[in-house]
Image (cartoon, rainbow, N blue to C red):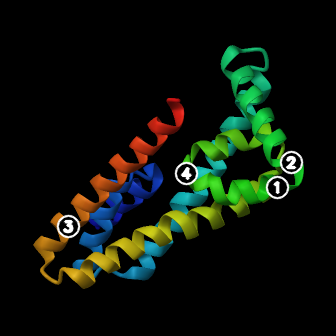
């Protein structure tokens, strides 16, 4: 039961290293996979609903605040880059990268709640949750020993996180 609770919290936070390790542990311990999937679905749907609602409240209540104006300026430049018709696809494709903040920013992009809900969930399901399972199943296939698989998934997760941080920094600096 504690593993399920930890997995639910990891799915809420969507921090890759601890989620990968917990998912591998649950898989190796023969926890019910359908319960793990259900926990992911519930956590993701809660994230989307709560952060979208917080985004709407922030957008309405603090219209003239510097933070809200900065988000509005960035989303307008992003929309001008994408075009109005590609926002749903961008939410599907880019949403998992900054999830759950993408649900918070969605009201500024003027995408309806249900469109945000569907496209963020599908993007997160495919690009984040699917990637987690590919990593866990790949490591488990290459390293049948449970302890070695745990170390391998931790190392791969840390290296992936460092690589993503490095790529973000290299894009910010000319």
Q: Residue furthest front?
A: 174
Neighbourhood count class around disc 3 (C-alpha, 10 Å): few under 14, some 14–19, many 20 upward: some
Q: Residue furthest right?
A: 84
Neighbourhood count class around disc 1 (C-alpha, 10 Å): few under 14, some 14–19, many 20 upward: few
Q: CA distance from mark 3 to mark 4?
A: 23 Å
- Disc 3 vs disc 2: Cβ atoms closer than 8 Å? no
For the image shown, how many numbered marks are present on the structure?
A: 4
Q: Earlier in the sequence, mark 4 or mark 1?
A: 1
Neighbourhood count class around disc 4 (C-alpha, 10 Å): few under 14, some 14–19, many 20 upward: some
Secondary structure at badge 3 equals helix
- Disc 4 vs disc 1: Cβ atoms closer than 8 Å? no
- Disc 3 vs disc 4: Cβ atoms closer than 8 Å? no
Q: Circle 4 is placed at which residue position?
A: 97
Q: Circle 2 is placed at which residue position?
A: 83
Q: CA distance from mark 4 to mark 2?
A: 20 Å
Look at 12% across and 80% down and name the residue there. 145
Answer yes or no: is residue 2 visible.
Answer: no
Neighbourhood count class around disc 2 (C-alpha, 10 Å): few under 14, some 14–19, many 20 upward: few
Relative to 44, does residue 132 appear above or below in the rendering? Answer: below
- Disc 2 vs disc 1: Cβ atoms closer than 8 Å? yes
Q: CA distance from mark 3 to mark 2?
A: 42 Å
Name the one closer to the observer, 128 or 58. 128
Q: CA distance from mark 1 to mark 3?
A: 38 Å
Secondary structure at badge 4 equals helix
Q: Circle 3 is placed at which residue position?
A: 152
- Disc 1 vs disc 3: Cβ atoms closer than 8 Å? no
- Disc 4 vs disc 2: Cβ atoms closer than 8 Å? no
Q: Circle 1 is placed at which residue position?
A: 86
Q: Earlier in the sequence, mark 3 or mark 4?
A: 4
Q: Earlier in the sequence, mark 3 or mark 2?
A: 2
Q: Position of residue 67 (x, y in %)?
A: 66, 20
- Quarter holding the N terminus? bottom left
């Amino acid at each position: 039961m504690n593993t399920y609770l930890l997995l639910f919290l990891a799915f809420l936070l969507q921090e890759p290293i601890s989620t990968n390790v917990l998912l591998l542990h649950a898989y190796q311990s023969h926890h019910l996979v359908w319960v793990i999937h259900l926990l992911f679905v519930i956590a993701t749907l809660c994230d989307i609903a709560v952060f979208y609602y917080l985004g709407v409240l922030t957008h309405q209540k603090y219209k003239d605040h510097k933070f809200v104006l900065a988000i509005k300026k960035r989303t307008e430049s992003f929309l001008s880059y994408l075009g109005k018709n590609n926002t749903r696809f961008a939410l599907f494709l880019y949403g998992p990268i900054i999830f759950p903040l993408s649900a918070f920013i969605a009201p500024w992009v003027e995408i309806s709640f249900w469109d945000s809900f569907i496209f963020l969930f599908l993007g997160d399901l495919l690009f984040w949750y699917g990637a987690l399972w590919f990593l866990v199943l790949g490591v488990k296939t290459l390293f049948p020993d449970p302890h070695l698989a745990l170390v391998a998934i931790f190392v791969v997760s840390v290296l992936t996180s460092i690589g993503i941080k490095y790529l973000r920094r290299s894009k910010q600096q000319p």
